[in-house]
Image (cartoon, rainbow, N blue to C red):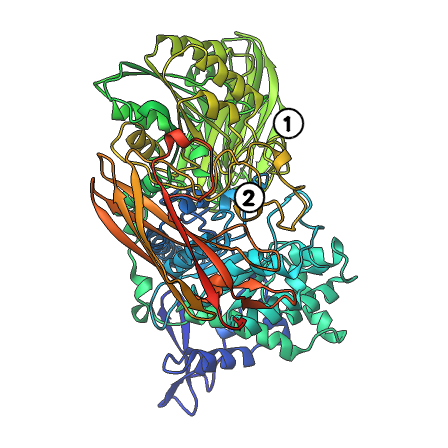
């Protein structure tokens, strides 16, 4: 503790230790400048950093920053996630995955979602601090949103983005960032981090070595506009650098990206964080330099202040070797502490309104309602021949079939929190028609060949030995430490292993981040066969069968299933031991199994034959697509997809069910575009629901049975085949996304149907516009159908006389509006100079005189498929830009 004249006084506020120092004697107290709230943030930061040693400064540039006790700087972990709800920190409201949020095409609603997320983030953070917890996923600096362009549907992480269009992505990200960071003039509510900057969208498997190559035009037309919007309009206070190289430079060590463009062009004044391990890649994988000292120095000098990883530990030696100066390190450290001061971390709670958001806000009724409303808005109706939808609630017997019908994991996507009461599609449908129709369920098939359908091992096969006899349940020894040491605090028999203690523990006097349980007993299967046996949980577990280890798992980030196959004989005893330990965050453990060889197909066909209507709930799973491959399945690689269609086992089941001739609806849950070509031709009604969050089942049922009229739109193109696409590794945009794709898609970007119809007319625009001036566009939209509904009005612009390559068309405006039957509204858009600009032959952004075509409607113009099912129209016209070439820079 730093003292002057031994007259120090400690003040505790907001979980921070404040030090009052007497500068002269005990009769005159003076606050150290960095704790003086009357000073500016710059003055306070400069004072604090000036008091640190080089070693202390460097320690603060790691994502896990240790305490500096002598300055009363507490430990802080910068790593946090809130992609579609506060993630990996236990109980939270879980909204639809990011791709579903984009499908709303509603920036105002996006802001409401982000505001709810940041409310829960603040409440959680302050509760953690009160408990003395300052670890990973407990801070206020969130590595969200992911605003990379989803240029290729094979990218496993595309589900985390807002789609393939820079304008839609930028608009939605601005709304999200503002909701996360708040509107207080002095304090940030939380920090939003726009990632992964830049030119990054897979493949995942070689991201640590890959060099993305584009020309300046693609960089400026596709890969940068939304980041520019996030900084200039959204005010994002943080940016995360990508793993890959761009034009030979590692993105986290690129002065072009981080200094020239981000800071000098766009005026970014926050801090940059590396993706995790990306600084290590600079020397170890990209081999841009030879040593960790050189890599750390290069990254900091290029503008990356924070290292997710440990390479920045070498900065002290890098200074000694002359690769970087301490003054350059000072700049970086000051930027990091500016964020912490702006978050109010060195001020009393009563000065920071956000610090007083109550813990009760987490998963509150208002947020649950918002999650349902958001799921409603995200659902896209792709097909509805002959008005099959909405279904009648008294439709007789309804068969709900498919691997996604009753699975909670598939609702949540990735980078998710844990909802208290998730509602699966089966549950939602069953509740919706309760008392009016009978619902029968069949799993139907696995997600993909050899991907098990897990369930909790039932109590009827679990036993322990007592007095020489088998008694029901497993005997559990509960320890007050995570190492199974000493005598257990208590022992009890648990009928089955299916526990979620959330942020708590099994005993009132247990440390909720330091306990363990060892269950022992026997498992006596009733059916012989090959079983997939394992567990799902966090922080870690081991599973033993007959004394031999079967699976081990430990991960501080998220719970996950780990399993292996075993051969069991009916009626035979097998010794079972489960070792579970909790080190951090949420505490949960499930003992899982799946019997291979079960005839799911016959069960599904039998259910469908009994039914009057069949609802097939199919698609993908976060186990099949994502940041990393969680299972080994044909058609997927490293979290990315190799094929665009559904796994064969799902396609075969669909064809078998449809062949029965029953009215059939297909509901898709997935995070990326799927080539459902056969289904599009043969199934009359198709609904795209993405990974729809905790309220999934209610929202889907509301759409299927007409209590909600869908209005979502596709934020990505649904292609028919990967043969329509350039190679996945090709970052040049020719042939990718609706802006450059010249083929016929299965469903185009911006597409979506309704239970009503909309007509457009009275398009008004100027005949001529002087280069550099704005153009106002108006159109009337009428609900020409019989029911109320929402319409997503989209404006596209095409430059018809450009003498350099330009997009076929580009989205430049959208509004989601609500219309009663017969109601008409006038929608107005304003195009500015940048909207009419192009990248010229010298790679400068200019407005070049010529003819511009405008299309306004509820969809993208030019799509010729599914004309008999269209529910919206498009009006188009053109105007001329006159005068001299106008520079937008």
Q: Can residue 365 be seen?
A: no
Q: x, y (%) of residue 407?
A: 43, 28
* Outermost residue toward the bottom in this view: 24
Q: CB of mark 2 within 8 Å of CB of mark 1?
A: no
> In the depicted view, which residue is nearer to us: 710 or 766?
766
Q: Work out whether mark 2 precedes mark 1 in sequence or the reverse, and give the earlier one.
A: 2
Displayed quadrant of residue 332: bottom right
Secondary element under disc 1, as helix, strand or loop, is loop
Q: Residue furthest right?
A: 290
Q: Position of residue 150 (x, y in %)?
A: 54, 46
Label 2, residues with CA under 10 Å away: few <14, some 14-19, many ≥20: many
> Which of the numbered marks, if any, corresponds to residue 656?
none
Residue at image position (50%, 24%) is 592
Q: Is residue 707 above or below residue 812?
A: above
Above or below, 466 relative to 22? above
Out of 176 and 7, give the one closest to the viewer: 176
Task: Locate the C terminus by quadrant.
Answer: bottom right
Query: Which element type, helix, strand or loop, lies under badge 2?
Result: helix
- The 10 Å Cα crowd at callout 1, few under 14, some 14 to 19, many 20 or more, is some
Instruction: Tell me how far mark 2 sits from mark 1, CA to CA.
Output: 18 Å
Residue underneath mark 1: 634
Position of 348 with respect to 461 (left or right) is left
Q: Is residue 801 left or right of residue 712?
A: right
Q: Which residue is mark 2?
A: 157
Look at the image and tell me whether residue 426 can be seen. yes
* Residue 492 coordinates in the image, percent (x, y): 41, 27
Give above or below for 39 relative to 593: below
Q: How many marks?
A: 2
Q: Residue at x 50, y 48 (%)?
A: 161
């Amino acid at each position: 503790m730093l003292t002057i004249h031994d007259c120090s006084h400690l003040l505790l506020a907001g979980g921070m230790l404040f030090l009052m120092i007497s500068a002269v004697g005990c009769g005159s107290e003076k606050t150290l400048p960095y704790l003086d709230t009357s000073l500016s943030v710059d003055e306070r930061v400069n004072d604090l950093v000036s008091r640190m040693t080089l070693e202390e400064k460097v320690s603060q540039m790691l994502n896990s920053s240790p305490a500096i006790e002598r300055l009363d700087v507490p430990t802080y972990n910068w790593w946090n996630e809130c992609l579609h709800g506060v993630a990996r920190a236990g109980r939270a409201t879980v909204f639809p995955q990011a791709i579903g949020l984009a499908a709303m095409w509603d920036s105002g609603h996006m802001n409401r979602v982000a505001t709810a997320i940041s409310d829960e983030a603040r409440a959680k953070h302050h509760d953690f601090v009160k408990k003395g917890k300052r670890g990973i996923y407990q801070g206020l600096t969130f590595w969200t949103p992911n605003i990379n362009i989803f240029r290729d549907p094979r990218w496993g992480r595309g589900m985390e983005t807002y789609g393939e269009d820079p304008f839609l992505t930028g608009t939605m990200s601005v709304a999200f960032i503002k909701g996360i960071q708040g509107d207080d003039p002095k304090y940030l509510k939380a920090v939003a981090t726009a990632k992964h900057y830049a030119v990054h969208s897979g493949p995942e498997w070689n991201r640590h070595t890959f060099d993305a190559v584009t020309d300046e035009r693609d960089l400026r037309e596709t890969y940068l506009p939304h980041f520019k919007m996030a900084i200039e309009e959204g005010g994002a206070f943080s940016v995360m650098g990508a793993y890959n190289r761009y034009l030979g430079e590692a993105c986290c060590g690129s002065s072009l990206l981080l200094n020239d463009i981000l800071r000098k062009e766009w005026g970014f004044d926050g801090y940059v964080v590396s993706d995790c391990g990306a600084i290590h890649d600079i020397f170890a994988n990209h081999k841009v330099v030879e040593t960790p000292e050189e890599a750390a120095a290069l990254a900091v000098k290029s503008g990356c202040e924070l290292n997710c990883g440990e390479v920045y530990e070498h900065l002290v030696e890098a200074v000694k070797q002359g690769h970087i100066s301490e003054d350059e390190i000072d700049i970086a450290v000051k930027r990091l502490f500016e964020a912490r001061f702006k978050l109010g971390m060195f001020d009393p709670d009563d000065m920071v309104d956000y610090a007083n958001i109550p813990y009760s806000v987490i998963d509150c009724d208002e947020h649950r309602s918002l999650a349902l409303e958001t799921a409603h808005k995200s659902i896209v109706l792709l097909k509805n021949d002959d008005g099959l939808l909405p279904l009648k609630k008294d439709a007789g017997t309804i068969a709900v079939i498919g691997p996604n019908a009753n699975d909670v994991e598939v609702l949540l996507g990735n980078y998710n929190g844990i909802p208290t009461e998730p509602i699966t599609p089966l549950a939602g449908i069953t509740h919706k028609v309760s008392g009016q129709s009978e619902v029968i369920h069949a799993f139907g098939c696995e997600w993909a060949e050899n991907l098990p359908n897990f369930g909790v091992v039932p109590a009827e096969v679990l036993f322990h030995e007592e007095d020489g006899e088998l008694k029901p349940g497993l005997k559990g020894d509960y320890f007050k430490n995570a190492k199974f040491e000493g005598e257990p605090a208590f022992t009890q028999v648990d009928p089955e292993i299916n526990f979620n203690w959330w942020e708590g523990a099994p005993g009132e006097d247990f440390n909720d981040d330091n306990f363990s349980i060892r269950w022992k007993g026997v498992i006596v299967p009733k059916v012989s066969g090959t079983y997939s046996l394992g567990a799902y949980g966090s922080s870690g577990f081991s599973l033993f069968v007959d004394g031999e280890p079967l699976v081990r798992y430990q991960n501080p980030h998220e719970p996950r299933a780990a399993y292996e196959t075993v051969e069991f004989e009916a009626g035979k005893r097998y010794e079972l031991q489960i070792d579970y330990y909790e080190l951090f965050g949420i505490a949960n453990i499930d003992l899982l199994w799946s019997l291979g060889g079960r005839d799911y197909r016959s069960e599904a066909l039998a259910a469908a034959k009994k039914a009057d209507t069949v609802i097939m709930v199919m698609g993908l799973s976060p186990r099949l697509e994502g940041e990393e491959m969680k299972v080994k399945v044909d058609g997927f690689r490293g979290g990315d997809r190799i094929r665009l269609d559904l796994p064969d086992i799902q396609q075969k089941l669909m064809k078998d069910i449809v062949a029965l001739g029953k009215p059939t609806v297909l509901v898709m849950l997935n995070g990326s575009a799927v080539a459902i070509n056969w289904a599009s031709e043969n199934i009359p009604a198709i609904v795209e629901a993405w990974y729809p969050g905790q309220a999934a089942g209610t929202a889907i049922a509301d759409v299927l049975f007409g209590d909600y009229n869908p209005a979502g739109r596709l934020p990505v193109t649904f292609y028919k085949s990967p043969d329509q696409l350039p190679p996945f590794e090709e970052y040049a945009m020719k042939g990718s996304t609706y802006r450059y794709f010249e083929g016929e898609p299965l469903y185009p970007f911006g597409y979506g149907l309704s239970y009503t119809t909309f007509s457009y007319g009275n398009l008004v625009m100027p005949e001529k516009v002087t280069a550099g001036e704005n153009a106002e566009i108006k159109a009337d939209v009428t609900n020409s159908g019989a029911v109320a509904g929402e319409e997503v009005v989209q404006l596209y612009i095409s430059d018809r006389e450009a003498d350099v390559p330009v997009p076929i068309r580009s989205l430049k405006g959208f509004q989601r509006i609500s219309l009663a039957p017969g109601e008409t509204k006038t929608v107005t858009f304003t195009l500015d100079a940048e909207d009419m600009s192009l990248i010229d032959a010298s790679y400068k952004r200019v407005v070049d005189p010529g003819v511009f075509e405008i299309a306004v409607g509820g969809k993208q113009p030019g799509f010729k498929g599914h004309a008999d099912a269209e529910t919206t129209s498009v009006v188009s016209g053109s105007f001329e830009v006159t005068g001299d070439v106008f520079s937008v820079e």
